[in-house]
Amino acid sequence: MDSNQTNFFERVYEVARQIPYGRVTSYGAIAKALGAARSARMVGWAMNASHAMEDVPAHRVVNRKGLLTGKFHFDGTNLMQQLLESEGVKVVDNQIVDFEKYFWDPQNKD
C-alpha cells in the first residue's frame, strides 16, 4: 500500500469510528464525506482491511441499498448481521429493514 492509500484508509476509519451505535452508513456516503464521491469501492477495500482493528465498526457500513455486502469478510457467516442486531438494527435476507431509519449521513451527522 502506498502512503496515499494508507492516508485514505485512515480517513475512512476516522469516519467509521463516528458512526453511532445502532446506526449504519454506506460506502458511498463515507466516500462523499471525504470529498471522494467516486471512491465507494475504495472505502469497501478499507473496510475489508479493517477487520483486525477492533475500534473500527466495519459492520455498520453497508451498500447504498442497505445490503450487507461486506458480510463475507467477517468471521462466521452471520457475524455482521449478529453485530447489527445486537445494536437493535433489524436485518432480513442480508438487508437492513427500514434502512432510512438507521442511516447515518457522515456529512450531516444526524
Image (cartoon, grey):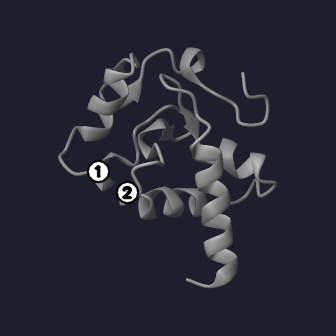
Rendered residue at 73%/58% (across/down): 38
**Where is residue 9 drawn, in percent x and y?**
60, 64
Rendered residue at 46%/48% (across/down): 55
**Where is residue 81 drawn, in percent x and y?**
30, 32
68 shown above or below 7: above
Q: Earlier in the sequence, mark 2 or mark 1?
A: 2
85 shown above or below 94: above
Q: Give the residue at mark 1.
A: 74
- Asked which quadrant contains residue 67, the reply is top left
Which of the two residues, 53 or 61, is positioned nearer the viewer here? 53
**Where is residue 99 drawn, in percent x and y?**
52, 21
Rendered residue at 25%/39% (across/down): 79
Q: Secondary structure at mark 1?
A: loop
**Left or right relative to 37: residue 96:** left
Nearer the viewer's eye, disc 2 or disc 1?
A: 2
Residue furthest to the bottom: 2
- Asked which quadrant contains residue 95, the reply is top left
103 shown above or below 9: above
Q: Tag on residue 51?
A: 2
Rendered residue at 79%/29% (across/down): 108
- Callouts 2 and 1 close, C-beta under 8 Å: yes
Residue flagged by tag 2: what amino acid is it? His
99 shown above or below 46: above
In which quadrant of the rendered image does the C terminus lie? Answer: top right
**Where is residue 69 drawn, in percent x and y?**
41, 45
Q: Tag on residue 5?
A: none
